[in-house]
Image (tube, rainbow, N blue to C red):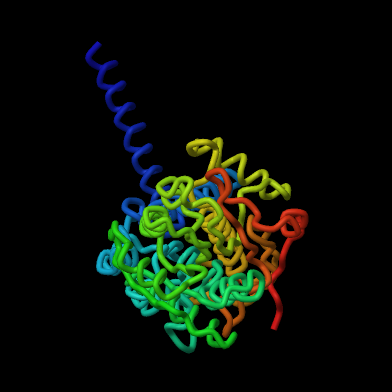
Amino acid sequence: MKFTKSLFTLAAAGVFATAMMTSAAFAADTIKIGVAGPYTGGSSSMGVSMRDGVRLAIKEINAKGGVLGRQIEPIERDDEAQNARGVAIAQELVNNEKVIATVGFINTGVALAAQKTYQDAKIPVMNNVATGTIVTKQFQGDNYIFRNAARDEIQAPMIVEEAITRRGYKKVAILADSTNYGQLGKADLEKALAAKGITPVAVEKFNIKDVDMTPQLLKAKEAGAEVVLTYAIGPELAQIANGMSKLGWKKPLIGSWTLSMANFIDTAGKNGEGATMPQTFIQEPNTQKRKAFIDSYLKEFKPKNNRIDSPVSAAQGYDSIYLLAAAITQAGSTDGVKIREALENLQTKVEGVVTVYDKPFTHDDHEAITENIPVFGTVKNSRVVYAYQADAEKGSDIRLKKKK
């Protein structure tokens, strides 16, 4: 009896040891990709949606065998939209986790602060949300920073064209937050307005977590502003819309893509109706790829009222993983230099949610989105829909990147 028990114990120990070794081998053999963004705080509508889009893409790819016969392992970190924390996370992911690439960066300031760690380590970054124009131009030569979001250099002229040319307003106010994102976006707006011969009648700044926009709005009102252009994120944008209501001064809100955030729409309520913004993706199942993505996202994450909190962030997060997977496959390697070179010369088309990526990057162009891809969305009944029927009718047309 004792002999049988000993055999059983030894056998069990052997099975356990084998399982542990197999688990360790699997963990060591995964392809680690960093996923950095704000999953708490005012930017979380964007961060969580991006993260979930990334999770969905990784789940699909792993179910089909992964990349190079290996599973992708996301290493997720909450940067809380804090620059210093973003830097610390980048250092951890590079030095301790040994990621071969990172996706994310929701906030322009965090991107600009943290990217140097990846650049120095020759590890590619796919910015899938941060839109500050300078983000992909921070480094010269062999640049490891890529993007599949519509930079502000695209959005600002669209916003100005909508306000000045399409709607005919002449007296414009700009309200932007004090972050890198807000102030760089403001500069892009002023540049686009100057190209139209327009000087804004008021340019006002506010801080993250400000809850009273009355002083800024009163200055815009007293200056005779006919429209308010914005560069900020959801919670503060909602305070602008609600502040207008308190003053009995309802003017059109036209701003950057962040007017589509759930925490703007929900906090502003009826005061946010009609807010208009550029969008690379609107939650409409108008192609097979988009329908499959939307259906899978809703089934997997069960968002409230079947509305993705930030559809743009989710779609771009999803696409960023497929772009990286294509590059790793082409490179036949997880070496950062080879992945960068593959991204700059992708030989296979990548069918994404936003677009079909056909040679989206070159050595000197790390922007996957050109000005012909975004359309205008507008808030209607607590959702973002196409602002113009003509765009809705052509929603199934895939807008491809313009070639230089």
Point out residue 244 in the picture as x, y percentages from the top left corner.
41, 58
Q: In the rendered image, which quarter contains the N terminus?
A: top left
Instruction: Say whether residue 173 is visible.
Output: yes
Q: Specify whether 2 is left or right of 187.
A: left
Point out residue 149 in the picture as x, y percentages from the top left corner.
54, 67
Q: Residue at x 67, y 44 (%)?
A: 291
Quarter of the figure with residue 17: top left
Which residue is at the far left?
2
Q: 370 and 172: which one is in front?
A: 172
Q: Specify whether 105 is left or right of 10.
A: right
Q: 14 and 372: which one is in front?
A: 372
Q: 334 and 304: which one is in front?
A: 304
Q: Is residue 235 above or below residue 14?
A: below
Q: Specify whether 273 is left or right of 388.
A: left
Q: In the rendered image, which quarter contains the C terminus?
A: bottom right
Quarter of the figure with residue 177: bottom left
Point out residue 176 in the picture as x, y percentages from the top left corner.
39, 70
Point out residue 293 in the picture as x, y percentages from the top left corner.
62, 46
Quarter of the figure with residue 180: bottom left
Q: Residue at x 28, y 64 (%)?
A: 82
